[in-house]
Image (cartoon, rainbow, N blue to C red):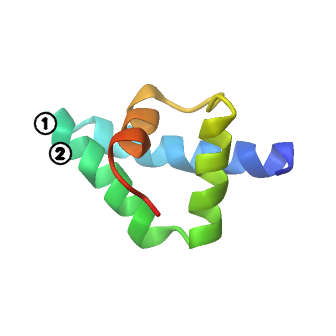
Amino acid sequence: MSHSSADRLVTMANQIGDFFETMTDREQSLKDISGHLKRSWAPPMRRKLLEHIEHGGTGLKDIVLQAVQTNKII
């Protein structure tokens, strides 16, 4: 995966995280983040995000990382 491709996905995922992070129920935020990724992102994008996480997940907000690690997106 190219560096710019990962950067774009990280930026997009973090924007989703920013939106849902404002919710008071963290568990629901995690479910909503992963649900949004599953509904809105094409499978290749989700696979690339998972691959990025497998290689350290550099740049991802903690809430996004936790959402993906605790809820299935593929």
Image point 82% across, 51% down: which residue? 1
Which of the pair 10/66 is nearer the observer? 66
Quarter of the image where one finds residue 3: top right
CA–CA distance between discs 1 and 2?
5 Å
Q: Amino acid at mark 1?
A: Asp
Looking at the picture, how far across and down is residue 27, in whole percent? Answer: 18, 38
Looking at the picture, how far across and down is residue 24, in whole percent? Answer: 14, 33
**Residue bearing mark 1:** 25
**Residue bearing mark 2:** 28
**Residue 43 - label:** none
Instruction: Give neighbour class at mark 1: few <14, some 14-19, many 20+ (Cα, 10 Å).
Output: few
Q: Which element type, helix, strand or loop, lies under badge 1? A: loop
Q: Which element type, helix, strand or loop, lies under badge 2? A: helix
Question: Left or right: 41 with respect to 30?
Answer: right
Which of the pair 20/64 is nearer the observer? 64
Looking at the picture, how far across and down is residue 57, in whole percent? Answer: 62, 32
Image point 43% across, 49% down: which residue? 16
Question: Left or right: 60 with respect to 48?
Answer: left
Tell me: residue 55, above or below residue 7.
above
Looking at the picture, how far across and down is residue 13, in whole percent? Answer: 52, 47
Which of the pair 18/32 is nearer the observer? 32
Image point 67% across, 55% down: which residue? 48
Q: Amino acid at mark 2?
A: Gln
Pick out the residue farthest to the right.
Answer: 2
Q: Are marks 1 and 2 in contact (CB under 8 Å)?
A: yes
Instruction: Give neighbour class at mark 2: few <14, some 14-19, many 20+ (Cα, 10 Å).
Output: some
